[in-house]
Image: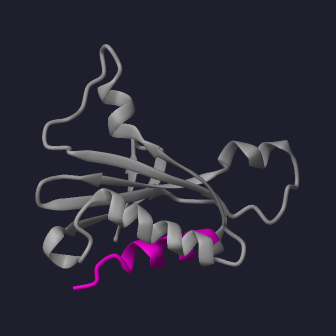
Amino acid sequence: MQQTHFDEKYPVYELTLQKSETTAASASEIISRLKANVDSHPIAAFIGLFDHFAHTKNLPEGEIAEGIIAAQHIIFCFGVKLPGARVMAVRPRSIAVTEFADHFVVNFMEPPMPVATNAMEAWVKALRDR
């Protein structure tokens, strides 16, 4: 798993996963595995799924980079405290799965909460199951 910065300011964790490294055959299967992790976590709450590919494809001027065949988000929250309004700006969390012909890119923006970071990193690393 690689830690980078998108646009030089957003801390992102990212894993490129060759399809030969996982038994998951599609972005939807990876999202299902991640949902099982969210559902079984003692403080995480599932919120929803978002098909970014379908949304963008249906826009009149939507643009999708060459090679992307699926792009989905799973959205959830780890919020155990609500200390004020500002914390709402960094919630909820999501993990994105982008599918290409021979690999997946799975990434998320670093949460400000170590327990969330650790869980999300573990969930993504566990996708490599071959």
- Residue displayed at 12% across by 54% down: 101
> Principal SS element in the magenta part?
helix
Between 6 and 81, which is closer to the camera in this rendering? 81
Query: Where does the image place residue 93, in percent across and percent down from the top left?
Result: 59, 54
Can you give x and y, in whole percent of width and height, for residue 102 in the image? 11, 60
Q: Residue at x 34, y 71 (%)?
A: 1
**Farthest bottom residue?**
130
Residue 117 painted magenta: yes
Does 23 appear above or below 97? below
* Residue shown at 27% from the left, 47% from the top: 70
Q: How many labels sit on residues?
A: 0
Q: Residue furthest right?
A: 83
User: Is 57 displayed left or right of 43 in the figure?
Assistant: left
| Residue 51 on image: x %, y % | 41, 42
The magenta span reads 116-130
Would you say residue 67 sits in the magenta stretch? no
- Snapshot quadrant of residue 97: bottom left
Residue 41, percent from left and from top = 64, 77
96 left or right of 100 in image: right
Q: Relative to residue 88, is residue 127 drawn left or right?
A: left
Q: How is the image coloured?
A: one colour
Q: Nearer the viewer, residue 76 or 4?
A: 76
Q: Residue at x 21, y 85 (%)?
A: 130
Extreme residue toward the top, this view: 60
